[in-house]
Image (spheres, helix red, strand yellow):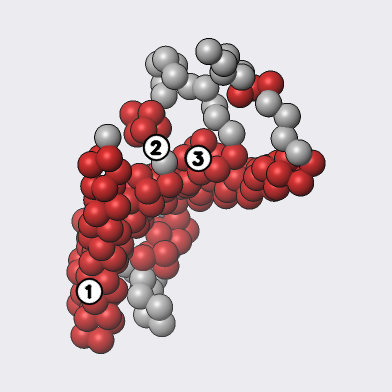
Amino acid sequence: MAQLQDPTTVKLRPLPNLIFMSRWLQLPLYLGLILAQGVYVFHFWVELVHLIEAAMGDKTALQTVLSAVAVKGENVPTDAKLTETTIMLVVLGLIDVVMISNLLIMVIVGGYETFVSRMNLEGHPDQPEWLSHVNASVLKVKLATAIIGISSIHLLKTFINAGALTDRVLIAQTVIHTVFLLSALAIAMTDRLLAAPAHAEH
């Protein structure tokens, strides 16, 4: 009976080896996303500090917060106060940053694990639950789900601030969110249909 060759000792021919090694060209992309993650962390803390300072009565911070949540083209009154609606809009903005950050983590960790190299995190106490069975299809569905979550936050911010927006903007954002939702459902259904023949073969 022929012995199976250890896959770690298999030497590829030059051209296949070059093609296979080209996957490492994606590494700078993931490193760039890590830097983008750092920018989001910085932005999160800047917005949070402004909100805390505004709550403590700092007029400059209050104007910054109001300008951040104001509708484009809307004038911010100088005597405006920090209201519950303004706080809610700022907090939703912070949640939006966190959800985009989660999306970045999924792309960085899941993409590197799927397309570049194994991280060998099996048994690690901090291994993400979804990473143990991640593949291109699972990653695609999770990304679509994350995008729906981000779109939901944007839509909620729009509805809270509906009085300052036109009907056209409200309808457009609702339609866009619905398209995202239908796209995610289509991706999930396609993934299930493609997975069914594979399970049937086993």
Q: Which mark is residue 114?
A: 3
Q: Residues within 10 Å of mark 1 (few under 14, many from 20)?
A: some
Picture quadrant of residue 176: bottom left
Q: Nearer the viewer, residue 196 or 188?
A: 196
Callout 2 touching callout 3 (CB < 8 Å):
yes
Total labels drawn: 3
Measured as percent of width and height from the top left, residue 53 is found at: 41, 47
Q: Is residue 202 left or right of residue 108?
A: left
Mark 2: amino acid:
Val
User: Mark 3: which secondary structure?
Assistant: helix
For label 2, the residue is: 134
Q: Residues within 10 Å of mark 3 (few under 14, many from 20)?
A: some
Q: Is residue 65 left or right of residue 161?
A: right
Alpha carbon separation for disc pair 3 and 1: 34 Å
Q: Earlier in the sequence, mark 1 or mark 2?
A: 2
For label 1, the residue is: 174
Measured as percent of width and height from the top left, residue 22 is found at: 70, 46
Q: Is residue 36 above or below residue 184?
A: above
